[in-house]
Amino acid sequence: MSIIEERKGEEVQPTSVEWTALSDLSNPPKFTYECRIYLLREDDGRYSVWLADLPGIASHGSTLNRAVENIKEAFIGALSVYRTRGSEVPWLARPEEKPTDAVERWILVDA
């Protein structure tokens, strides 16, 4: 039985589908990234934080939570630059070695 027969004689018009390349979207879809970070409490009580798998992305904060929020913002900013340039994200094949006094954590970032 065809779809036309199922609709009791109604003629079904095919719909037109327009495809858009992801690179043509002004607002690309968001993804959730799992990011490994290293946190280090400094002598002054602040926290330094950096992405273990992506070179050059680092930040700091007066509290642990602020440091984590700041590294998320830094990562989102870097992704924006890579996307604008049409570049691939230069993930490291292996993470940087964790300093002995740093703490390793995983965070989720929607970007």
Image: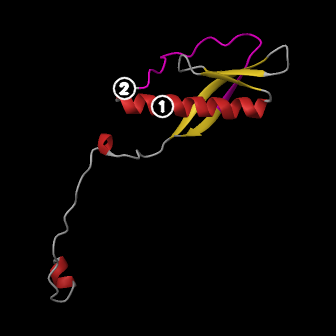
Q: Secondary structure at mark 2?
A: loop
Of the two numbered discs 2 and 1 on the same chain, state the one appearing first in sequence.
Answer: 1
Give the side of residue 74 with respect to residue 63, left or right. Answer: left
Position of 65 relative to 44 (above/below): below
Give the residues drawn in magenta, as a range. 89-106
Q: Quadrant of residue 11?
A: bottom left
Q: Residue at the spot x=74%, y=10% of the render?
A: 100
The CA span between labels 2 and 1 is: 9 Å
Residue 49: percent from the left, percent from the top?
68, 22
Image quadrant holding the N terminus, namely bottom left
Q: Which residue in the protein does label 1 denote? A: 79
Residue 45: percent from the left, percent from the top?
85, 20
**Main SS of residues in magenta:** loop
Position of 61 relative to 10 (above/below): above
Foreground residue among 109 and 83: 83
Q: Residue at the spot x=47%, y=45% of the render?
A: 30
Find out whether residue 111 is within the magenta segment: no
Q: Which residue in the protein does label 2 denote? A: 87
Q: Secondary structure at mark 1?
A: helix
Q: Residue at the spot x=22%, y=60% of the render?
A: 17
Q: Quadrant of residue 7?
A: bottom left
Position of 38 relative to 72 (above/below): above
Give the side of residue 64 with respect to residue 24, left or right. Answer: right
Q: Specify the amino acid type for callout 2.
A: Ser
**Crowding near pointer 1: few (<14 within 10 Å), some, many (20+)?**
some
Q: Quadrant of residue 13?
A: bottom left
Q: Residue at the spot x=61%, y=38% of the render?
A: 108
Find out whether residue 95 is within the magenta segment: yes
Q: Specify the amino acid type for callout 1.
A: Leu
